[in-house]
Amino acid sequence: MQRDGRLLIGGEWVAAGDGTYPVVNPATETVVAEAPNASVGDARAAADAAAAAFPAWARTAPEHRGELLDRLADLLDKRRDELVPLVQAETGATLRVTNSMQVPMAATRFRRYARVEPNIVPLPPSIMPTTALAPGGIIGAIEHRAPAGVVACITSYNFPLTNMAGKLAPALATGNTVVVKPAWQDPLGVLRMCELFSEAGFPPGVVNVVTAAGPEPAEALVASPAVDMISFTGSTAVGCRIAEVAGRGMKRLLLELGGKGSAVVFDDADLASVITAVSSVWTFHSGQICTAPTRVLVHRSREDELVAALAGVADTLAVGDPLERDTVVGPVITGAHRDRVEGYVRSATEEGATVVAGGERPQLDTGFYVAPTLVAGARPDMAAVQEEIFGPVVAVVAFDDDDEAVALANGTQYGLYDYVFSADTGRAMAVAKQLRSGTVGINTAQRNHEAAFGGFKMSGVGRDGGSWGLHAYSEMQSIVWPG
């Protein structure tokens, strides 16, 4: 990296106040590079720089902002061969996942928000009577979608480039300036991406980046008077802390938090579709994805058949070096996280469930690996069923009727992404509407990126995705006048 160990603040690459810290490859346990370790002062300086750049950027024509976003997307495409190995090394993702989702999706998201959409919503005139406040008459009005201000963009480790691009693109398109704070485990690709903003023509201070091994700089960003909005993707526990600190300054929040997705499998379901969707828990970045269907709620009449089929799939998945073409399941992000995932599997067996696939640590010389694991005979009160594991572990719970299935699906603190599988799509739609979940997939695990995305309950606050992302990073300003 050209800027190894430096932060971007106000258009300048500066040494971090607390030196550097090592970023470790989860597959080899070797150091990829040293990342800058920002101080609290660095975080505050970045917020102040973004605030100074905001007025001019907010006045910039949306068409010009779109041109710059398009230019950035082109630069990301050109740097793909450089970014793929860097992001792969710091995340431990397989080559298939890195080549398909970790890097190219970032350019796709910038290009999506380069399309200019109107920031004025016309409203019908209203006939108002004379009051003590003002004379009567025909009153015209519009809604103006104004930028929120300075946005602190804080992301999780699982898809560092894609997640950050999903925040930066709509935030910048609507005229906000930003402070970028990637996850401490894998900030290198984000740092490299942020080098490209200057090359694309973005003015100094519009995009600033701080990275740190500890939480203090991020908390300083959230608390800074210069920051108007926090956009966060990560755990529910951290999201609650952000909401607590941000609440003191009445800051705007967009929080995409944890999930414990359920796959409701009815007696008439096509099991091939179910297996394809549920297997993604194991095959898609080792289950480190908040939308994964990690709870399989299956009608008792199909339980044995589905468990046998899933176990057969789990046993065929190659675990190992993510650089090998045949590898399907790579490592999880750290040794501590591997221990946490294994702890959930252990607790499930202690509580009476049966591990029918996986459950033992793969015998590899290096790397933080967890075998694709299937837990059957689980009860809804078990920790492995209630809490987000964020690893390649699937738990199966049986139900007897539709009402019980809905109750089980809604029976956790989360509500981010659920799934319903049934040959009767009318039945599936009726059940989907009863689920307390931000998104419900019917007979598919595929996404629609124009749909609103976010969670119910402890899975978050607010919605982004598609045009909803433009609303998420805006304040609605009503402007009225006599007609």
Image (spheres, grey):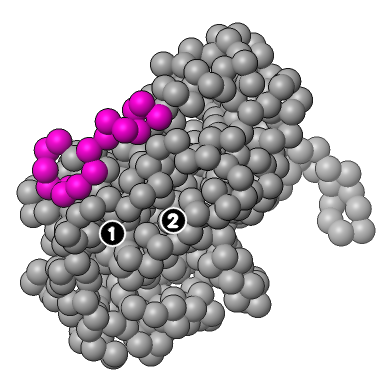
Circle 2: residue type: Val
Q: Is residue 287 magenta?
A: no
Q: Nearer the viewer, residue 257 or 402?
A: 402
Q: Which residue is mark 2?
A: 341
The residue at 44%/78% (across/down) is 215
The answer to whether residue 405 is above or below residue 135 is above
Circle 2 sits in a helix, a strand or a loop, which is it?
helix
The answer to whether residue 198 of the structure is visible from this angle is: no
Q: Position of residue 362 (x, y in %)?
A: 27, 50
Residue 262 - label: none
Circle 1: residue type: Phe
Residue 189 located left or right of residue 445: left
Q: CA distance from mark 1 to mark 2?
A: 11 Å
Residue 311 located left or right of residue 479: left
The answer to whether residue 144 is above or below residue 154 is above
Mark closer to the chain start, 1 or 2? 2
Q: Which residue is mark 1?
A: 368
Predominant secondary structure, magenta span: loop
Residue farthest toward the right in the current orientation of the protein: 132
Circle 1 sits in a helix, a strand or a loop, which is it?
loop
The residue at 57%/42% (across/down) is 353
Q: Are marks 1 and 2 in contact (CB under 8 Å)?
A: no
Q: Give the magenta part as a residue range.
A: 311-326
